[in-house]
Amino acid sequence: MYFVLLRQMAISAQIPSPDEIEEAKRALRQLAALTQGHAPAGEVELRADDASVAVTLPRQAVKGLLELLGQIANGNAVTILPVHAELSTQQAADFLNVSRPYLVGLLETGTIPFVRVGAHRRIKAADVIAYRQSQEARSKALLDQLAADAQELGMGY
């Protein structure tokens, strides 16, 4: 994968304006219609005012562009980081929506790998994303189990 998208991180992301949201929706519809559910590699023409250029994009870039436009169309701020990017403990905590001391506890117990750079801890973005995905999967499984238990007990859910 060329890059990952981190939603709502305060590294350099800005909340899109209503005009930018509408532009992203329009572009997303056009690109989605072009790809028809799959992301082909191929040439795309980009236009800015009176100039245009044809660019050949790899399949992964088209998929990333679709994801990027979708997030902007939903009004989310988006930051693009290389998979190997390293985050500070505060950036990682912000991404996970936890306190920095809680994150440090996860690091110290080995739940999330990290490296020390001098006195500072650095965490790979890919490791933070993997942790978040595992927590989301765990939460979903627990909610499914609770719903099944409620059904079995006839609680009306």
Image: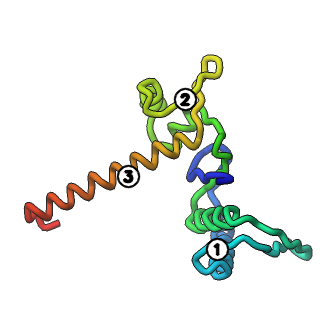
**Mark drawn on residue 114:** 2
Residue 133, horizontal then vertical, whole percent:
45, 49
* Residue at screen point 41% across, 47% down: 134
Residue 93, horizontal then vertical, whole percent:
50, 37
Image quarter of residue 42: bottom right
Query: Badge 3: few (under 14), some or many (20 or more) residues near its Cα, within 10 Å?
Result: few
Disc 1: which residue: 28
- Residue 22 can be seen in this image: no
Three-letter amino acid code at the position of disc 1: Leu
Residue 141, horizontal then vertical, whole percent:
30, 54
Position of residue 119 relative to residue 43, above or below, is above
Separation (CA) of disc 3 from disc 1: 28 Å
Image quarter of residue 27: bottom right
Residue 152, horizontal then vertical, whole percent:
10, 62
Q: Secondary structure at mark 3?
A: helix
Q: Quadrant of the N terminus?
A: bottom right
Three-letter amino acid code at the position of disc 3: Ala
Along the line of sight, which residue is nearer the eye, 95 or 134? Answer: 134
Circle nearer the N terminus (3, 1): 1
* Residue at screen point 57% across, 37% down: 91
Specify whether 27 is left or right of 53.
left
Circle nearer the N terminus (1, 2): 1
Specify whether 153 is left or right of 82.
left
Query: Mark 1 or mark 2: which is in front?
Result: 2
Disc 3: which residue: 137
Circle nearer the N terminus (3, 2): 2
- Residue 54 can be seen in this image: yes
Position of residue 98 relative to residue 6, above or below, is above
Q: Secondary structure at mark 1?
A: helix
Q: Are marks 3 and 1 in contact (CB under 8 Å)?
A: no
Three-letter amino acid code at the position of disc 2: Phe
Q: Secondary structure at mark 2?
A: loop
